[in-house]
Image (cartoon, rainbow, N blue to C red):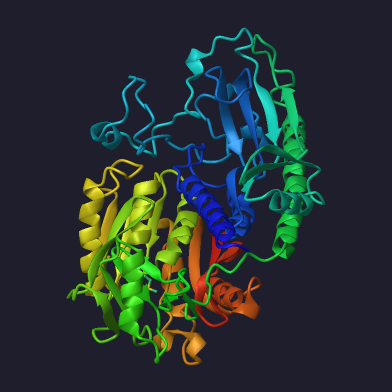
Amino acid sequence: MSSNDSTWKQRKRNDFGNAKAQCLGKRDKSFQGRIDARAVEVCGIINERDDMYTTSSCAGRCFLYRGVGIKATTDFSRFRISHELIKDPKRYFDLSTIEEDPTGGGDPVRTIGQYDYKVDINGTGEENDKEVAESNDSETEVIMDNTDASNSSSSNDSVVWLRYEPFILHVACRSLSVASLLMATARPAFKNVGLTAWKEGRYLVAIWGDEGLEMPLCTPIGMPLFPPNDDSVSKWLAQLCNERHERNWSKIQRFRQNLREMKPPTDDDPDEYQLSFADNPDDRTPVPRSFDVIGDIAYLHSIPEDADSRLIGESIMSKNKSIKVVVARRSNLEGTERAPGEEGLEIIAGADRSPLITTHTEYGIKCVIDLNHTFFSPRMGQERLRICQQVARGENVLVCFGGVGMEAFQIAGRTEASSVVYVELSHHAVDCAKRGHRMLERNKNVKCIGAAERLEIIQGDVLDVVPSMEQSFDRILAPRPKEGKLDSDLGTGDGGAQFLKVLLTRLKEAGECHWYDFVADWEYPACERTRTLIFSVCDELGLKMEVLHVARVGSVAMRQLRICLDFKVLRS
Ligand SMILES: C[S@@+](CC[C@H](N)C(=O)[O-])C[C@H]1O[C@@H](n2cnc3c(N)ncnc32)[C@H](O)[C@@H]1O
């Protein structure tokens, strides 16, 4: 392969990667503001791969509606959207209470656009401003799918319809062969699979279920088509929806299994310690195949002992004009802080900066990093986006082991969470987080207003701080450190069970937890050890747990992975 060919292929890969990051980083404009819980795993498996990304998804839902039934038209009002089984048919199908009971036992109704710059929540034609957002209460205000029922002008205004929409997924693929592979993987579960759009370097695959249902429940003058007080009718209608839910979910499960067996993702963590040589054959300066770029610092995780480190550093700087310092790690990440320590980094080229502090930008959001004393990995950027995609409107989120704060900043700046609480033990990390918090306040790139106001920074030990909190959370992030007596990977601790016990007492009913753990590559994706740990802690606390997804987040050493197990907790 000529060097021109390889440059062209690399450029195509970068274009696709940039389009993927841009797409996954967009604010979620759906009703829930998040990926449906039952689609999380399918989307997670796809988005872990370098050659695909999901552009939209719905796990399947039923709802009642009035109007033309076409989304994105003003003449369409939806009520009682339910992604789960209908448990109280009498309440759900009582058409006389549609206005005063818009959920009818379905999904909670969310306030749309409360923290969004782009949505005109007042109908004034002006974008939101801070005062508007602050005067709105996410618990009380109800905006149905961003449409106003009173604007409806159709002659069929009063007809209430019942609709079941099955699973639907759109996936962008890097090449035609990747698209074909995905379609072949989906077909055993879903018959409706096709290529809907394509251009060089981007092929859009659509996969949709066939469990549809659409029926009127009353006449144009509002007269019910079924006896309104007949329980057997509402039970029968619920059964129609629930059967579709069950069939649809089992197809998703089958698809998920097939996806797991699809060819594994290309390793995004190449062996960066192998050195290659510069493009110019006369220039024999070795340059690492990959290194991290954190702010304006190039960070080499190690360097061969016999290599000329100054030459390597200068070579990196000569090819990357934005890099001002090159550092090489000379020690392992150790201690509670998972940082190299005062002596652990050697500056091998560039300015003799001390302290080694830099500002890093990830999808427009900034954080401050003290490289000697804090843990930060730019490779976790996509994982942070993955978490943001799961945060629904109005959630209260707890970010434990917050480090320099990037997860907390991304959630506050990119989602419509009502509150984000960050907890971190190390004062070095908290100092960085406080500086990042001030930057968030001034940052014009953040997608959602009031990001800094919705974020609270707390310094302290999770084991002390969390039990003393009165608040409960819809979502808890626990990127726990891999070190010390709490870590069973060292054969001495409890794998973080103490942390988990404390955190789960603060999780609301049906709340979700993102639990980070360390596994050998052969343990993934089953991760039985991690599941057993979570299951036993839940059992001890009298909780039921449901695994939503196991994500491979990165590698910490040869054949050792960092994973995130997303699970849901049920109290009853
Ligand atoms: C692996 S780092 C993760 C940092 C950050 N979440 C990230 O991914 O960039 C773990 C962090 O947990 C903090 N930590 C360790 N033990 C803690 C505890 N008991 N309470 C609060 N924070 C703790 C460490 O200081 C460190 O910043």
Count of marks overlaid on the render: 0
Q: Quadrant of residue 544?
A: bottom right
Q: In the image, is residue 384 above or below residue 206? A: below
Q: Residue at x 76, y 54 (%)?
A: 185
Q: Position of residue 532 (x, y in %)?
A: 60, 77
Quarter of the image for the C terminus: give it: bottom right
Q: Residue at x 80, y 49 (%)?
A: 187
Q: Residue at x 40, y 92 (%)?
A: 306
Q: Position of residue 302 (x, y in %)?
A: 40, 83
**Residue at the limit of the structure toward the front, as seen here:** 282
Q: Position of residue 386 (x, y in %)?
A: 50, 56
284 and 291: which is toward the camera: 284
Q: In the image, is residue 490 above or below residue 368? A: below
18 and 182: which is toward the camera: 18
Q: In the image, is residue 333 above or below residue 101? A: below
Position of 425 compared to 223: left or right? Answer: left
284 and 390: which is toward the camera: 284
Q: Position of residue 64 (x, y in %)?
A: 63, 28
Residue 349 is at least partly visible in this image: yes
Q: In the image, is residue 205 above or below residue 359? A: above
In which quadrant of this rendering is ligand 1 seen? bottom left
Q: Quadrant of residue 292?
A: bottom left
Quarter of the image for the N terminus: give it: bottom right
Residue 403 is at least partly visible in this image: no
